[in-house]
Image (spheres, grey):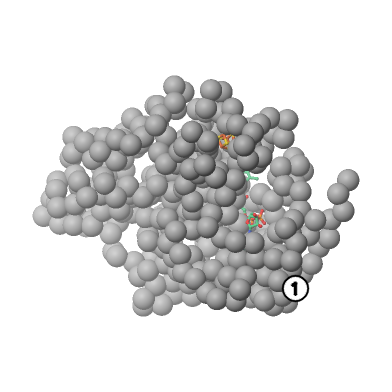
Amino acid sequence: MKPLSYARPRTQAEAAALVRRSPDAVFIAGGTNLTDLMKLDVVTPDLLVDVQDLDLTELTHHEWGTVVGAGVTNAGLAGDIGIRRRYPLVSEAILAGASGQIRNAASIAGNLLQRTRCGYFQDVTKPCNKRSPGSGCPAIAGAHRELGVLGTSEHCVATHPSDMAVALAALDAVVRVRRATGSVSALTLDELYRLPGDRPDRDTTLEPGDLVTAVELPAPTGAPSRYRKVRDRTSFAFALVSVAAMLKVEDGVAVDVRLAYGGVAPRPWRARTAEAALLGERPTDSLITQALQAEFATARPLPDNAFKINLAASLTRAVVRDLAPAQKAGR
Ligand SMILES: Cc1cc2nc3c(=O)[nH]c(=O)nc-3n(C[C@H](O)[C@H](O)[C@H](O)COP(=O)(O)OP(=O)(O)OC[C@H]3O[C@@H](n4cnc5c(N)ncnc54)[C@H](O)[C@@H]3O)c2cc1C
Ligand code: SF4
């Protein structure tokens, strides 16, 4: 058995220094993902640095936007009245995931930084480039129905499991990071998450000791929004495909459109090609189908997950049908 130490520092600088000092030290927040992976021997830290005394629980609303501390719980964020009024798709996305008990313990930073649910990654008896670089990716010829079609590589086809991150991508949220060196960065989700390329072991651009301190949401745009998730069961199941959609229609044409997808890529996938195709146009079923075809033109589907491309298109058509009439009716 590997010895394991636990530290509960009072300052962010101390916490960062502790993690930076040992290659096997990690931050722990709610522990709902980390301890699962420890029990499976997927991660084997020698030091857990608890973030709960680091003053990370701010949740404040401003004219320019909202600040959500990294230590706010998933349940606390989903239930906050300001979030429900200003960014309902964030609440919808969080409530579409996990369970009440897990959401009570899970933190915002932990949700963003949770690891993939690929079965080979979680099974230390199997090769996996993400867990053990250079060992291979058995998912490509094996079980990949739940895995990615966009942004994948020949080294890894895993998806990012977070629902909340998909909503944050649609909202153009920014993740605040206190670097181990003491400097502060603000990263978009595309800057936070890496695509696998030939280094699938690195999920993010963070370095050891970099502490996520908060997420900033820009002021609401007023565009109606929805989060919709397709999964195999209605609880304890990750997205096969999910969409966070925002759509404002004026005089029948889309004047503000945001689309982000979960379950299809190693990071929440902001569909900028599809958005550009829809902007200024009537969001008809046939145009949405064309826009999604353009978005998925670079997809690399595998035999058992190619269905995700059509599923993303039909999900988008359904969500747009929900959003567009809501505006005609003045809701
Ligand atoms: C049965 C089950 C079902 C689930 N279903 C869903 C689902 O449908 N959708 C979904 O989105 N999620 C789902 N989840 C995942 C759940 O949302 C995550 O486990 C949870 O959000 C992780 O948060 P945490 O605070 O417990 O993170 P932890 O487990 O404590 O940490 C996770 C990672 O984040 C790092 N970390 C934590 N805080 C910081 C910080 N401030 N700075 C830097 N690094 C940090 C840790 O080092 C670790 O690597 C499910 C989990 C379970 C167990
Ligand atoms: S898809 Fe990625 S996480 Fe899954 S087995 Fe392949 S390398 Fe590992």
Residue 50 visible: no
Q: Foreground residue, 42 or 20?
A: 20
Is 149 or 318 nearer to us in this picture?
149
Relative to residue 2, is residue 239 drawn left or right?
left
Give the residue displayed 29% in from the left and 40% down from the top.
Answer: 295
Task: Check disc 1 and give the amino acid type.
Answer: Pro
Residue 292: percent from left, percent from top:
28, 38
Residue 159: image location, x then y, percent: 50, 40
Residue at point 80% right, 56% down?
Answer: 46
Tell me what residue is drawn at x 37 percent, y 60 percent: 171
SS class of the residue under badge 1?
A: loop
Q: Quadrant of the N terminus?
A: top right
| Residue 45 horizontal/vertical position (percent) | 76, 53
Q: Quadrant of residue 87?
A: bottom left
Quarter of the image with the C terminus is bottom left
Question: Label 1, on which residue?
Answer: 9
Label 1 crowd bin: few (<14), some (14–19), many (20+), radius 10 Å: some
**Quick check: which quadrant has ligand 2?**
top right
Counting the numbered discs, the total is 1
Residue 253: give x, y in percent of width and height. Answer: 14, 51
In this rendering, does residue 293 appear at all?
Answer: yes
The quadrant holding residue 180 is bottom right
